[in-house]
Image (tube, coloured by chain):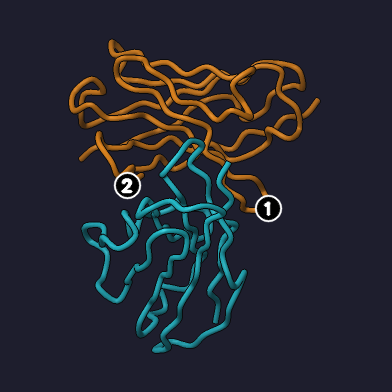
Chain colours: A orange, B cyan
Amino acid sequence: QVQLQESGPGLVRPSQTLSLTCTVSGASINNGGYYWSWIRQFSGKGLEWIGYVSEAGNTFLNPSLTSRLAMSVDTSKNQFSLRLTSVTAADTAVYYCARVPPGAPDAYALWGQGTKVIVSS
Amino acid sequence: DIQMTQSPSSLSASVGDGVTITCRASQTISYHLNWYQQTPGKAPKLLIYAASKLQSGVPSRFRGSGSGADFTLSISSLKPEDFATYYCQQTNSYPHTFGQGTTVDI
């Protein structure tokens, strides 16, 4: 049974860099052609698609975040990561990782449980 | 970005009722529309993908329909576990935007 688990700091200072990792268990991250995604949810419940990265490292990012955002895959650790620079209070949210199967349509069927990130001094 | 607008924002219903939630895209998205259910403290759960395809394991009382820019999620005969918030998401173009959510409560 494939599972995803997010990890990272619960608190980040403004202007610092947020780094999150999603660990994949029960399957190899570089088997199957999946896309590995990040989505966040604000306290008002709105959901925002952050982007996704292929097993080969190709990224598709939300244009509103591209200047601050990077995603990567570490096949040796079976993990993928998000790095968001210059964070502000507006980046406070629950961050989810998810898996998207190859080919259209994009169906986000597998999610992690989410990790809460607060940006505050 | 494609804007997704759900209606209503919330609705009240009773166990056994049928309900319908609508989702409208700001431009045509073909059939590239997903529906999710979320309960408090949990990640969204995929119910419907490609507008009308039922995700494995999801009860058949959930039905999705529509194409182009207008879509609906129908739930027949509500069960207690169906009281939740529902979101639509378009995957026709990047970024894959979500609707604002519809809360179904008792």
Name the residue furthest top.
A76
* B64 with respect to A17 (left or right): left
* Rendered residue at 35%/85% (across/down): B77
Displayed quadrant of residue B72: bottom left
Q: Between residue A29 and residue A106, name the one nearer to us.
A: A106
Q: How would you rate the neighbour count of disc 2 (Cα within 10 Å): few for under 14, some for 14-19, many for 20 or more?
A: some
- N-terminal label among 2 and 1: 1
Instruction: Give above or below for B5 relative to B95.
Output: below
**Residue B23 appears at what percent x and percent y?**
50, 64
**Residue A74 appears at what percent x and percent y?**
35, 13
- Label total for image: 2
Displayed quadrant of residue B17: bottom left
Quadrant of the image containing the N terminus of chain A: top left
Given the image, on which type of amino acid does mark 2 rest? Ala
* B12 with respect to B36 (left or right): right
* Rendered residue at 45%/20% (across/down): A81
Q: Between residue A114 and residue A44, name the one nearer to us.
A: A44
Q: Return the chain for callout 2.
A: A
* Rendered residue at 47%/33% (across/down): A38
Secondary element under disc 1, as helix, strand or loop, is loop
Q: Return the chain for callout 1.
A: A
**Residue A51 appears at what percent x and percent y?**
48, 30
Displayed quadrant of residue A3: top left
* B95 with respect to B57 (left or right): right
Residue corresponding to mark 2: A109
Secondary element under disc 2, as helix, strand or loop, is loop
Quadrant of the image containing the C terminus of chain A: top right
Name the residue furthest right.
A121
Residue corresponding to mark 1: A44
Q: Between residue B72 and residue A27, name the one nearer to us.
A: B72
Q: Between residue B83 and residue A30, name the one nearer to us.
A: A30
Given the image, on which type of amino acid does mark 1 rest? Gly
